[in-house]
Amino acid sequence: MNNTGFIDYVLDALSPHGNIKARKMFGGYGIYKNNLCFALIINDVLFFKVGSGDQARYEEYGSEPFSYENKNGTKVVMSYWQVPVDILENATELAMWVERAFRTAQATHKPKKVVAKKLTKKKI
């Protein structure tokens, strides 16, 4: 369960970094900048999108990736890592981490495929 106070706190902390919005998804929230998801809030924990080049930085803080068990009982590990509290509470550091997470989200974003609908003529 997510605490709306924590979500408000995160949105306030991220507000200097652009057009930041939260959207409910899968029992948590997706955090979007310019309509691109770069973070998650699950059970009052903030996770940023992380590329392989930044993973060691998160590991240094003892962070772990977000994971869940799917309906088949298989553990699924995602590329979102827990943001250390020290970073969340430091506006200068947070700005750099937000930018890296957003750039990673941009680099890994796959545009949705547009499906063309077949038009049929109506008989009169």
Image (tube, rainbow, N blue to C red):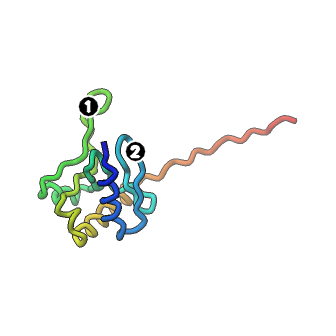
How far apart, in angstroms, are the residues tagged by discs 2 and 1? 20 Å
Task: Tell me the SS state at disc 2.
Answer: strand
Which residue lies under the disc numbered 1?
74
Q: Amino acid at mark 2?
A: Met
Quadrant into which the N terminus falls: top left
x%, y% of residue 60?
12, 58
Q: Amino acid at mark 1?
A: Thr
Residue in the image at 45% along x and 58% along y: 35
Q: Quadrant of residue 73?
A: top left
Tell me whether the residue at label 2 lies in contact with that at label 1, contact meaning CB atoms closer than 8 angstroms. Answer: no
Which residue lies under the disc numbered 2?
25
x%, y% of residue 54?
22, 59
Residue in the image at 27% along x and 53% along y: 46
Relative to 123, residue 96 above or below? below
Task: Check the image and name the residue furthest to the top.
Answer: 72
Q: Earlier in the sequence, mark 2 or mark 1?
A: 2
Residue 59's tag is none
x%, y% of residue 123?
84, 35
Neighbours of disc 2 within 10 Å: few (<14), some (14-19), many (20+): few
* Of residues 45 and 111, the one drawn nearer to the viewer in this rendering: 45
